[in-house]
Image: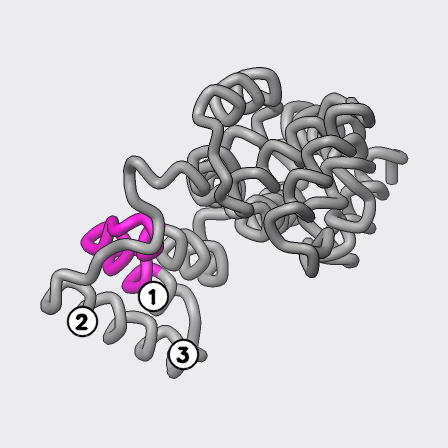
């Protein structure tokens, strides 16, 4: 087995959570290029492994509050392994968050088609159908700045985020944390320290969480 295939196997074995401890630089400079290269080179023969790797990459994006990026990963995963019930379920769940309830229902049905373990999926299907019946407001809506900034962070649009948040002169701690993460992506310690002090001036009990630290690694 080549080193890159072994890398992907180990990544799949570890799951999504360790990526946050490794940090953004590893995510962008090691994981992403290796995943793309293996997909291109071995896509015809290692379909199960590559499909699983893209599934986990999607889970990482969900941890980063980037559902659109997650959905793209799940769709790529299904390109390599179109019979994966787990991937259809994860795709359906992120579509539910985005308010795409009809598409989510279709993918839950496909998940049910490809598994004999359907109890949880039946619950998912009922919940999504209830969203349609009761016209539930999506978790992620257009115009939600926090969502938009977190999505942009995963794409490396740090300077755009910085300009936007600075111009808004916001005192919202969640948005200021996005500013802090953007400075982390650029490894701008001076402005990062200033931003964190601004957060502490608003809330002296504020702490850096795993997502804040992710962009500084």
Q: Which mark is residue 130?
A: 2
Mark closer to the chain start, 3 or 1? 1
Q: The magenta stretch spans which residues? A: 95-110
Q: Which mark is residue 178?
A: none
Q: Nearer the viewer, residue 182 or 81?
A: 182
Q: Position of residue 145 (x, y in %)?
A: 40, 37
Q: Which mark is residue 113?
A: 1
Q: Residue at x 57, y 26 (%)?
A: 155
Q: What secondary structure is found at the residue carrying circle 2?
A: helix
* Residue 167 located left or right of residue 141: right
Mark closer to the chain start, 2 or 1? 1
Q: Position of residue 160 (x, y in %)?
A: 53, 17
* Residue 149 located left or right of residue 10: left
Label 3 sits on residue: 120
Q: Position of residue 6 (x, y in %)?
A: 85, 43
Q: Nearer the viewer, residue 184 or 75?
A: 184
Q: Residue at x 69, y 48 (%)?
A: 200
* Residue 12 located left or right of residue 94: right
């Amino acid at each position: 087995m080549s080193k890159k295939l072994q890398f992907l196997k180990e990544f799949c074995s570890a799951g999504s959570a360790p990526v946050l401890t490794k940090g953004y630089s590893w995510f962008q400079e090691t994981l992403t290029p290796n995943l793309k290269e293996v997909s291109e080179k071995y896509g015809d023969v290692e379909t199960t492994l590559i499909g699983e790797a893209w599934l986990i990459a999607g889970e990482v994006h969900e941890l980063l509050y980037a559902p659109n990026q997650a959905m793209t990963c799940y769709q790529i995963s299904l390109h390599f392994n179109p019979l994966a019930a787990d991937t259809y379920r994860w795709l359906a769940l992120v579509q539910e968050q985005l308010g795409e309830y009809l598409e989510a229902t279709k993918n839950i049905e496909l998940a049910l088609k490809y598994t004999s373990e359907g109890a949880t999926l039946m619950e998912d299907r009922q919940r999504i159908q209830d969203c349609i019946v009761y016209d539930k407001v999506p978790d992620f809506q257009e115009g939600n700045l926090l969502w938009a900034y977190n999505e942009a962070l995963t794409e490396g649009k740090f300077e755009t985020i910085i300009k936007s948040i600075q111009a808004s002169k916001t005192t919202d701690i969640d948005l200021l944390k996005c500013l802090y993460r953007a400075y982390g992506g650029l490894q701008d310690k001076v402005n990062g320290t200033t931003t964190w002090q601004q957060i502490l001036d608003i809330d002296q009990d504020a702490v850096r969480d795993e997502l804040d630290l992710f962009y500084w690694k």
